Image (cartoon, rainbow, N blue to C red):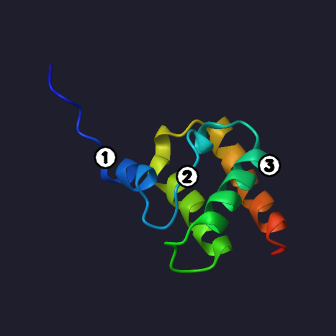
Amino acid sequence: MTARKQKWSQDVTDNSDAMDLEEGVFKQRNAEKIAASLKRSAERSERRKTTPFRSAMSMLTFYINRAGDELPKSQRTVLEKAKGELRKSFGKQ
């Protein structure tokens, strides 16, 4: 049996230089929890090159874009709502 090669986008999500993500953050079904987790990760990171808000939003957008058609509609909806929650939590409405 051969090892399955990991996609580069998964590698970025798993090993981002910008911040360490909590396990399963994008699999959660609650937009508020996703936003809170991303905010915590971004604020704790000492490696990010921009503001915590931009780092968190970039990682979320990157994940949504890279998942493409493989992302179920219901989860895409949750992740899109997480963008709004992230804006709200950083006071960027």
Q: Name the element at disc 1.
A: loop
Q: Which mark is residue 7?
A: 1
Which residue in the protein does label 2 denote? 21
- Residue positioned 23% across, 39% down in the render: 5
Do the CB atoms of the residues marked 2 and 1 lie less than 8 Å apart? no
Between the C-alphas of marks 2 and 1, the distance is 18 Å
Where in the figure is residue 82, as x and y percent of width and height? 73, 53
**Sequence-first disc among 3 and 1:** 1
- Residue positioned 40% across, 54% down in the render: 15
Where in the figure is residue 59, as x and y percent of width and height? 55, 61
Q: Nearer the viewer, residue 38 or 67?
A: 38
Q: Name the element at disc 3.
A: helix
Q: Name the element at disc 2.
A: loop
Q: Tell us which disc is closer to us: 2 or 1.
A: 2
**Sequence-first disc among 2 and 1:** 1
Farthest residue in the left direction? 1
Height in image: 83 above or below 52? Answer: above
Which residue in the protein does label 3 denote? 32
Between the C-alphas of marks 3 and 1, the distance is 28 Å
**Sequence-first disc among 3 and 2:** 2
Height in image: 49 above or below 43? Answer: below
Q: Amino acid at mark 3?
A: Glu
